[in-house]
Amino acid sequence: MEKYLDVRNGYQEHELEKIATILKNGGIVLFPTETVYGIGTNGLDEKAVKKIYEIKKRDRKNPTNLLVSNMAMVEAITQDISPMEHKLMQTFFPGPFTIILKRKKIVPNIVTANSDLVGIRMPDSSIAQKLVQLAGVPLAAPSANISGKLSGTNLANVIDEFSGQLDFAIDGGESKIGMESTIVRVIDEVAHILRPGFITPEQIKRIAGNVILEENESQILPSSNMKHYQLDVKSTLIYSKDPQKMIHTILSSSENYSHCVILCCTENAKYYQNQKNIKNVIDIASKSDLENYTKKLFSSLQKASSLSPDMIFIEGVAKEGLGIAIMNRLLQICNDNYIEL
C-alpha cells in the first residue's frame, strides 16, 4: 500500500516537507485541494508528468494545469502577462480559478500538449498550497481520476483506482467545493470563460467588465472535444422551469425501466418515493443552496452509479450563477442525453 498521511485533524509541517520532497523529485502524490483531489508531481519534470498521463490513462492531447504558490512562481513560468490577466489573478488567486497564460520554455511540452499556452492555478487549500511552496516548483496536478471517470472529492472514491502506482496519498476529507476550477483565457483584454466553475460569470464580469462564455471552445482548448466524464450506466438529464412538469416527466419516463435511480433536490425528493420502478432516490441538496449542491454532486453521482440501475434520471437546475457550471458537468456526464421542457 502507498504511504499515507491523514491530515483531517491537522498535521506537522515536517510531514508535508517529506512529501514535498517526493513531489520535487518526480514522485506521484494524491492530495486534496479545495476543488477536487489532485494527482500531482513536479510540473517541470517531463518524465514525471509523463507518469501522471500513464497512470490516469490521459490523452497526450489533453493539457494539464500547473499549481503555483505565489506570483513569483507565476512569473517564472509564464510571460507577457497583460493588465487584465494581472487583475484577474489579483482578484481570484488563491481560489478555484485557472487562467490560461503564455508559457516560458521551462514548461515542458507534455504539460501544454505542445501549445504555447499553460493553465495556472493558485489553490486556496492549505495542504495544496503548502505542498507547492515546500516543493519550490509548480505542480502538474490534474484531477485524481482515471480519464473519463468522475473527479474524486474524497480519498476513498479514488484511492483504489491508483493502487500500487502512488508514492504517497494524503487524506484531507471531503473537498470544500467538489467541482473543478473555472478556466479563463483573456483575448484582447476580454475574459473568455472556457470552462464554467465555482467562480461564476457574474463574479468575473464585475472585475473584467466584459465576459464571454464560450459555447464552443474547440479552437481554444486542446481537450475540448474529449469525453471528460463517464458513468458506468445510462443517465438522462431533465429540466423545466416548472418543477411539477419536470417531476411528472421523470415519473412518466421511469415507467420504462425496472430499476431507476433519481438524483434530485431536497424539495422534490418526496415526489419520487414509493414509486414502483424507482428503487433509490438520492437527495443532493436544496435547490436554494447550490454551493452545497455543487459540493455533493460528484459523490452523489458515484453513489448512484454504484447501485447499478438501468437508468439514472437527474433533475437539472437553472443555468444561472453556479447553475451554469452544474449543468455543464451534467450535460457531459449524460452525454448530452438531455430533455428540456
Image: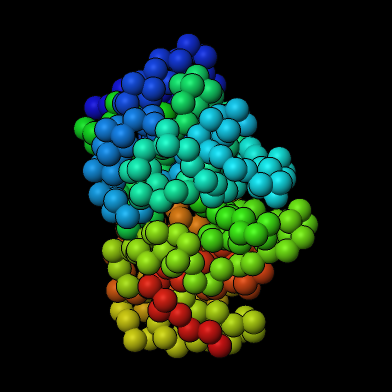
| On screen, residue 165 above or below 196 | above
Q: Is residue 271 above or below residue 7?
A: below
Q: What residue do we see at 53% from left, 38% from top?
A: 78
Tell me what residue is drawn at x 35 percent, y 64 percent: 227
Number of disc labels:
0
Q: Quadrant of residue 123?
A: top right
Residue 130: image quadrant is: top right
Q: Position of residue 226 (x, y in %)?
A: 35, 63
Residue 284's spot in the image, x, y percent? 54, 60
Residue 88 visible in the snapshot: no
Q: Is residue 50 left or right of residue 294?
A: left
Please state, as top left, top right, bottom left or bottom right, where the N terminus lies in the image.
Answer: top left
Q: Position of residue 53 (x, y in %)?
A: 28, 44
Q: Quadrant of the C terminus?
A: bottom right
Note whether residue 27 is visible. yes
In the picture shown, does residue 293 fall above or below 72?
Answer: below
Residue drawn at x 42%, y 76% is: 336
- Along the viewing direction, whichever of 21 and 270 lies nearer the viewer: 21
Question: Of all residues shown, which one is farthest toward the top?
Answer: 14
Q: Kindly indicate the quadrant of the structure image that contains residue 228.
A: bottom left
Q: Residue at x 59, y 82 (%)?
A: 240
272, above or below 187, in the image:
below
- Colouring: rainbow
In the shown orientation, is residue 169 left or right of residue 15? left
Nearer-the-camera pick, 105 or 225: 105
Q: Give coordinates of residue 295: x percent, y percent.
A: 55, 51
Q: Is residue 72 left or right of residue 253?
A: right
